[in-house]
Image (spheres, rainbow, N blue to C red):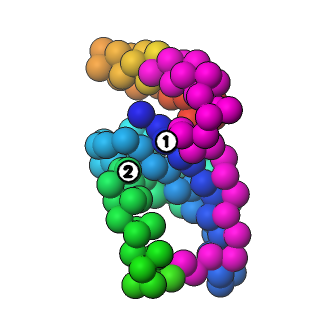
């Protein structure tokens, strides 16, 4: 389940990074999103980093404790946090849509239709 997407801009001049937080299986999601990410963002060198909720929580705790410091000049939220009360009804609809698109992409990929799987995967990524 997708929890949060942010575009993070490093303090030093350089490409931005899409920072994606998922409930679990970050490695699987990283590989699933990599090809579509490359197609959509290779022209501007935006990076992609996918982490799970536990890792995000650990990083936030370390930052609050003063053990690490962010090196960012700006953060733009692309997808709101799942626990925002006003966002919950929309989030449920979105999660259903995302699940359907990812399932369709997985089915197409599994049957050898990798090219056709790009469209539903792109819809899920851009939703």
The residue positioned 34% from the left and 59% from the top of the image is 55
Quadrant in which residue 103 is drawn: top left
Residue 77 placement (x, y as % from top left): 67, 52
Residue 84 lies left or right of residue 101; in this view the side is right
The residue positioned 36% from the left and 50% from the top of the image is 52
The residue positioned 51% from the left and 82% from the top of the image is 69
Quadrant in which residue 56 is drawn: bottom left
Residue that mark 2 sits on: 53
Which sits in the foreground, 7 or 118?
7
* Residue 105 forms part of the magenta stretch: no
Residue pushed farthest front?
A: 85
Residue 74 lies left or right of residue 33; in this view the side is right
Residue 69 lies left or right of residue 53; in this view the side is right
Name the disc covering residue 82, or none. none
The residue positioned 39% from the left and 75% from the top of the image is 62
Q: Quadrant of the C terminus?
A: top right
Q: Residues within 10 Å of mark 2 (few under 14, many from 20)?
A: some
Helix, strand or loop under label 2: helix
The alpha-carbon separation of the residues under discs 1 and 2 comes to: 8 Å
The magenta region covers: 70-99
Residue 17 placement (x, y as % from top left): 57, 62
Res. 42 in view: no
Of the image marks 1 and 2, the number of the one nearer the N terminus: 1
Is there CB contact under 8 Å for labels 1 and 2?
yes
Residue that mark 1 sits on: 3
Residue 51 placement (x, y as % from top left): 39, 54
Res. 71 in view: yes
Residue 70 placement (x, y as % from top left): 54, 78
Question: Would you place residue 58 above or below residue 33 in this image?
Answer: below
Q: Residues within 10 Å of mark 1 (few under 14, many from 20)?
A: some
Which sits in the foreground, 126 or 74?
74
* Residue 76 forms part of the magenta stretch: yes
């Amino acid at each position: 389940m997708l929890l949060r997407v942010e575009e993070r801009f490093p303090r030093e001049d350089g490409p931005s990074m899409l920072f994606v937080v998922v409930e679990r299986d970050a490695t699987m999601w990283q590989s699933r999103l990599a090809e579509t990410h490359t197609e959509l963002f290779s022209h501007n060198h935006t990076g992609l980093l996918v982490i799970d909720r536990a890792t995000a929580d650990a990083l936030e705790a370390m930052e609050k404790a003063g053990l690490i410091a962010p090196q960012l000049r700006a953060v733009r939220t692309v997808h709101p946090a799942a626990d925002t009360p006003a966002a919950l009804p929309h989030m449920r609809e979105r999660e259903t849509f995302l699940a359907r698109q990812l399932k369709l992409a997985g089915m197409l990929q599994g049957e050898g239709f990798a090219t056709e799987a790009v469209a539903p995967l792109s819809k899920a990524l851009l939703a």
